[in-house]
Image (tube, coloured by chain):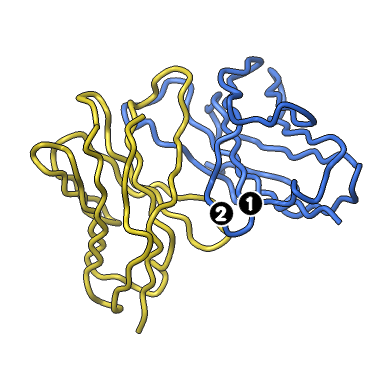
Amino acid sequence: NAGVMQNPRHLVRRRGQEARLRCSPMKGHSHVYWYRQLPEEGLKFMVYLQKENIIDESGMPKERFSAEFPKEGPSILRIQQVVRGDSAAYFCASSPVNPTNTGELFFGEGSRLTVL
Amino acid sequence: DAKTTQPPSMDCAEGRAANLPCNHSTISGNEYVYWYRQIHSQGPQYIIHGLKNNETNEMASLIITEDRKSSTLILPHATLRDTAVYYCIVRVPNQAGTALIFGKGTTLSVSS
């Protein structure tokens, strides 16, 4: 059973361009979470999605950032008009449709965005 | 979710037990204690969780005090590959609309 897959693993963008990060959850998982980790800092929760629904976006910046998890295909984190401060590692995690009592999340290896 | 307090850093000699403490004095009755770790530049990894009983798996042991106000993660024989940031998190499992909230964790350095 493949783990959480994120791509691209590394992405370089110039200021003002758009960045799209993709996350394929583990098979059978329909809950996806996005986290951001700035250099030398901790993991910050951004958004929690279920299929076709945003459940909690309390950690998302108000502008330029959006996320979706369509019925088919991966979850997408989209950053418009990137700035240097967006340079970070973006981690995706997933959990099952019918979660066990553990409530654990399974993380991908992250996508590292560098804005020049 | 209840707030947790962890020491910012700890050192451990290779082969010795690493005991990582966590205080969660405001934990509520239905909140579990979870431990994750993040090895440099990798995605976080689940280690273990528990409610009130001590737990053990192939990676670690979790000791929770009787009043549940604190816990200790034990790596019985630390190796260099256990060098990582360890996060203690308390939450209600699978509560609708909630996600894991990470604090600053403890940076464990294992040396030979």
The image position of residue A23, as x and y in percent, is: 67, 37
Residue B74 shown left or right of residue A105 in the figure: left
Proximity of marks 2 and 1: CB atoms separated by less than 8 Å: yes
Residue drawn at x 35%, y 84% is: B112
Q: The numbered mark 2 sits on a residue in which chain? A: A
Q: Is residue B73 above or below residue B1?
A: below
Q: The numbered mark 1 sits on a residue in which chain? A: A
Residue A56 shown left or right of residue B46 in the figure: right
Task: Check disc 2 and give the amino acid type.
Answer: Glu
Residue drawn at x 44%, y 17% is: B96
Say which of B92 and A74 sits in front: B92
Q: Quadrant of residue B83?
A: bottom left
Mark 2 lies on a secondary structure that is: loop
What residue does disc 1 label?
A38
Quarter containing the N terminus of chain B: top left
Task: Tally the numbered discs.
Answer: 2
Kindly identify which numbered label has been placed on residue A28. none
Task: Check disc 1 and give the amino acid type.
Answer: Leu
Kindly identify which numbered label has been placed on residue A41. 2
Residue drawn at x 49%, y 40% is: A106
Q: Quadrant of residue B111?
A: bottom left
- Chain A, which colour? blue
- Chain letter for the part of the structure drawn in yellow: B
The image position of residue B39, as x and y in percent, is: 48, 61
Q: Is residue A15 above or below residue B26?
A: below
Residue drawn at x 53%, y 27% is: A28
The image position of residue A105, as x and y in percent, is: 46, 37
Q: Is residue B52 above or below residue B81?
A: above
* CA distance separating discs 2 and 1: 5 Å
